[in-house]
Image (spheres, grey):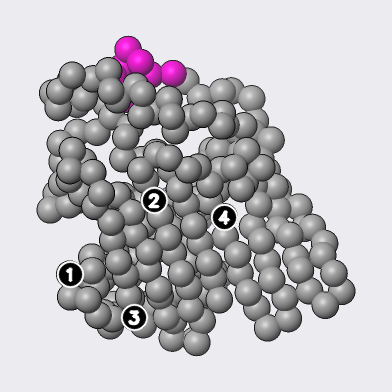
Amino acid sequence: MVHAMQYTDFLYRPRRPEELDTTQGGGVVFSQAAHQVDIVRLLADGEVTSVRAITGRWDPTRPTEGAYSALLTFANGAFASATYNGYGFYDTDLLMDGVGEMGRPKSRDAHYQTRARLKTVPDEAQEAVAKIERNFGGSLFTLAATEAPDACQHFGPVLVSCEHGDLRLTPRGVQVFDENGSHFVPAVVPAVPRAEVIDELWAVAREGRVPLHGGPWSQATVEVCLALLESQRAGKDIMLKHQVALLRH
């Protein structure tokens, strides 16, 4: 059993109009569930059999999905709950030792600051400009810190329950709870955030290895995201047919 939860300020960062339009790939399901589903599938061996989900659209000025909660079942008998809220109030990084998604310390007031900044943007056109200026080359772009992070990147609290114990993922490793008590298994902190993305690309391009995040795996993740939206519309479980198991090297 896997339980994954993430509360962020995603919906109130500067957005282009299409990022707030589900029909154009906007909203937290397409943008954020893809990450969370990838994590859950990786932990549960990949093959999702069904999805039951409910989504939230709670701000008419941001007319897309800003939250969801989904129950996933897997071919091997595992199951997972995945919850995401991007409305910028509570911050689950408080449950991650105050470490942000990129593995660096994060202010407790970050979400309030995000909402406050958006209130200073007068209209949709200016918001799109603000989005552009935050990107690489823009006037508001800031380079990431050059020093190595002191923790791993993460995507919110994740708890995994197994036959003989529970695992809690943290930014610095895994806390194991079993019949002998509790012990901590430290993780190797990368020199830069998301180094494994470049490592996987290098392995494919230079070593000829088959990627974990290749076409079939990515198609399966997108199928789960589409099923999440369809489950909300139909009010029922959605059965899947394009799933693949975790590729083991």
Circle nearer the N terminus (3, 4): 3
Distance Cα–Cα, label 4 vs label 2 = 13 Å
Circle nearer the N terminus (1, 4): 4
Front tag of 3 and 4: 4
Secondary structure predominantly adopted by residues drawn in magenta = loop
Circle nearer the N terminus (1, 2): 2
Examine the image and state in which quarter residue 69 appears: bottom left
Q: Tags 1 and 3 in contact by the CB under 8 Å rule?
A: no
Q: Residues within 10 Å of mark 3 (few under 14, many from 20)?
A: many
Residue 249 location (% of width, % of height) = 56, 69
Q: Residues within 10 Å of mark 4 (few under 14, many from 20)?
A: some
Give the left or right position of residue 78, taking residue 221 as reference: right
Q: Which residue is mark 1?
A: 233
Q: What amino acid does circle 2 point to?
A: Asn
Do we see residue 185 in this rendering? yes
Image vertical order of residue 215 relative to residue 25, above or below = below
Q: Which residue is at 36% across, 23% downward?
A: 116
Helix, strand or loop under label 1: helix
* Quarter of the image where the N terminus is located: bottom right
Give the left or right position of residue 195, taking residue 19 as reference: right
Image: magenta residue range: 132-142
Which disc is residue 157 wearing?
Answer: 4
Q: What amino acid does circle 3 point to?
A: Ser
Residue 205 location (% of width, % of height) = 43, 51
Q: As rendered, which of 241 and 157 lies closer to the eye?
A: 157
